[in-house]
Amino acid sequence: MVGRNIDALNIVLRSAPLGSKTQQVKDNALNLTMKVLLSIKASQIEEAVSRVDKDLIDVLMKYIYRGFEMPSEKSSGHLLMWHEKVFAVGGMGSIVRVLTDSKRI
């Protein structure tokens, strides 16, 4: 099951609507990505991040920050764990790139 969730994570990250101007498309992608992120147990996050394509780490960080903007019950704590593990891989550069990128998710 873990492998399938990680595969799903890579798929949603690869298909992120970075160039889309349609907010509904972005919101639908966010909802799907949040479902995938929240379906991965805290103990499996580090493994999941290690198996994310390195060129998608910034996209994952973008979704984490979007998730922080729209918190739901129990999502904030889980997203903080994701943030810690993604930061360990992407570093401060990932955060700076996400915050300065004009292509929002």
Image (spheres, rainbow, N blue to C red):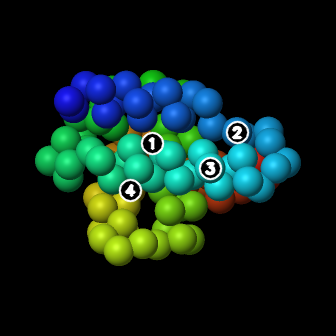
- Pointer 3 local density, CA inside 10 Å: few below 14, some 14–19, many at least 20: few
| Element carrying mark 3 | helix
Q: Amino acid at mark 2?
A: Pro
Q: Which mark is residue 18?
A: none
Query: What is the C-alpha distance between the residues marked 3 and 1?
Result: 25 Å
> What count of labels does the image hold?
4
Depth check, front residue: 103 or 14: 14
Q: Amino acid at mark 3?
A: Asn
| Element carrying mark 4 | helix
Q: Is residue 86 visible?
A: no
| Marks 1 & 2, CB-CB < 8 Å contact | no
Q: Which residue is mark 2?
A: 17
Q: Nearer the viewer, mark 3 or mark 4?
A: 3
Q: Amino acid at mark 4?
A: His
Q: Nearer the viewer, mark 1 or mark 4?
A: 4
- Residue 11: % across, % down: 49, 27
Q: Which residue is mark 3?
A: 28
Outermost residue on the left side: it is 43
Q: Amino acid at mark 1?
A: Gly
Q: Is residue 38 visible?
A: yes
- Earlier-in-chain disc, 1 versus 4: 4
- Earlier-in-chain disc, 1 versus 2: 2
Q: Which residue is mark 1?
A: 90
Query: What is the C-alpha distance between the residues marked 4 and 2?
Result: 21 Å
Query: What is the C-alpha distance between the residues marked 1 and 2?
Result: 21 Å
Q: Which residue is mark 4?
A: 83
| Element carrying mark 1 | helix
